[in-house]
Amino acid sequence: MNSVYVVVWKELKDMLRDIRTLAAIAFLPLLILPLMSLTSIYAQGLQPGYVALINYDKTSGSVGGVNITSEDILKEISEALEKNGLHVIYGASANADATIIIKEGFAKNLTSLTERARLEIIKTLGSSKADQVENIVLNLINDLNFRLASLKVIELSGIAGLNVSVDSVLRPVEAQVSVVGVGGAPVSYEEAIKVYISRFLSFSLIFVTTPSTAYITDSVIGEKERKTLEALLSTPVPRHALIIGKVVSTSLIGLLTGFTNALGLLLFAYVPSLIYGINLFYLIPGSVMLAHFIAIYFSVLSSLALVTPAVIRSGSYRAAQASSMIIISVATIVFFISLYVDIEQLSNVFKWLLYLIPYTHASLFIKFVALGMLREALTHLTILLLVIAGLMYVSIKLFNEERIIYGRT
Amino acid sequence: MSDAGKAVLVRGVVKDFGKIRALSKVSIEIDEGIIFGLIGPNGAGKTTLLRILATLLKQDEGEVKVFGYGLPENRVLVRKYISYLPEDAGLYSRLTGWENLYYYAMLYYGRTGKALEVTEIGAKISGLSERDLNRKVSEYSKGMVRRVSIARTLMIGSKLVILDEPTSGLDVFSAYAIRKTLKEYSRNNSVTIVLSSHNMLEVEDLCDVVALINKGRVIVQGPPKDLIRAYNGRNLEEVFISLAGEGM
């Protein structure tokens, strides 16, 4: 332990004094990610959107005792668009992001029992505002469809002398969704949201995996290139102490950078949620936050354990970085999978393949803490530690002075 | 042949790097307490031999012993008796000179009072002021870096000090200061110093025994004055040229 301390002492001094790199890797995401979030929201507001409304209809109609003209529909559309910050132009316009055309006979057909009213949305290619217009108008049409259908059902049932419930006719199937916990006990919608958030937290680990690899590469190959490694290897410091010392010190720096990266990502999501009046952090329980913090550290340690065998066998900084990037990129697939898939429910072959990747256990650890399944959470944390220890053992066994000194640069 | 009193014993050592033979049946003996110089041109095999003695490389053939312990099998033990300064060795640039010394002292003695004591010795050997020792190494000149590196190697009190081109690339004053430090240290501590150099005049002045090495072979070994006399040269350079051939 004494030798490990000595290596950690030097490595931490060396890394912490490299303020510029530390600031770039650790603190920049904390600034950039929330800023990206803010700018993307406000940039949308800054981009003007124009919608041309063209009305070819001169008809009117009546259903269920209600008179309807295309002007009424046009007014509704116009109000909905303007509420979403879009500018409405009456008549054709070459600058419009989208054009909405109300076809001839619209009001008459809308109230008819045999015809359908037609409305056309013409989107300009490449315009993000055009997609927004489409969404707004289609939502409005959905609502209009139901309102008109209700009026028609009431009118027809009156003619037929039947006692009719509008919902029974128009929405004969009613789906009721509820969520139960693992034991079958019902859980609140809020609890369910927490589990979705835990998936997002697992995904956020993807951002903590890479910064630490730059540090371990520098710690091993950087020493070689700065010509400090050879003398160090001739000292009595045990090889395991050297590797463990370098990995531990790098993991502590990686923890800082990983934490700020993950926090940056959370702020990326939190800033818009706050703007829209939802406090996301309120929905994340303390236990899940703690589990996330633990998972960050072990994900950083996992990254280091995964890349160290490749780094110590690399001849140059570039080769070490390239190998590290390949390994980490492949391993981080786990985080994408965990966002959409329940890993434990996968087929055995695929599941056990994923279990070999330490990140899988970090992800499952967070998930089980969020579900309140502590025994399962601790099992995956233990497996994670064992996988890390196994990879470290491989690094120690692969360590070869001659190869490091004479490795092709 | 008795191994007693020998700091280093190298017999018939061969080392290949792929198709290139770096050392070819090299044999040398180094008595305890002397300054031994390995001299030869670039690529002669000096660094390879020193790396084998420093436990960093394994020979392909032959026998290597340091204080009677065979290498590479006893490398963990041998590392306690040696300190090695590679050619152009760097220091940790973000650490101060003092911290560089302390780090190495801790690598040998752990977090003990002895490590601090050894660091103080290193600080004295370096000849740098307290103010300079408390500056980051990134602010040092090349000469200052080498003085701290030499001090770091000597302060440990190892029985065998291995120095690869210790004055290479230094100005006259810095090289002179380092030679003076080595001489004084060797005289006062009776340690064995093995150094390599391609500066034959420097080695002639510094070493008790030298081995001339060329193309992976030891051409001749002995005290510089004896070699100069035996081969009718004015200095070691002339001896080397006459033995290795002018064209080499």
Image (cartoon, coloured by chain):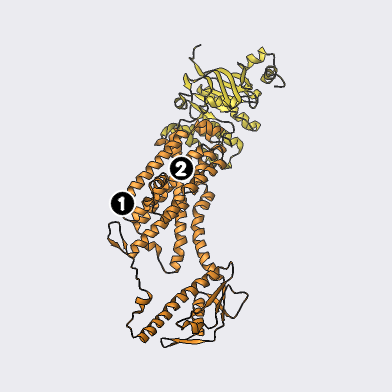
Chain colours: A orange, B yellow
Name the residue beneath numbered marker 2: A306
Using the image, name the chain to which the residue with label 1 belongs: A
Q: Residue A392 appears at what percent x and percent y?
A: 43, 39
Between residues B233 and A223, which one lies in front from this camera angle?
A223
Name the residue beneath numbered marker 1: A374
Task: Report if residue B89 is visible in the image.
Answer: yes
Asked if residue A276 is positioned above or below residue B64 in the image, the reply reads: below
Q: Amino acid at mark 1?
A: Leu
Residue A119's label in the rendered image is none
Q: Residue B141 appears at what percent x and percent y?
A: 61, 39
Residue at 65 percent across and 33 percent down: it is B171
The earlier-in-sequence mark between 1 and 2 is 2
Q: CA distance from mark 1 to mark 2?
A: 26 Å
Using the image, name the chain to which the residue with label 2 belongs: A
Q: Amino acid at mark 2?
A: Leu
Tell whether A398 sits left or right of B177. Answer: left
Q: Residue B156 appears at what percent x and percent y?
A: 48, 29
Q: Quadrant of residue B240?
A: top right
Give the class, few, some or many, for how many residues have Cα within 10 Å of label 2's Cα (few <14, many ≥20). Answer: many
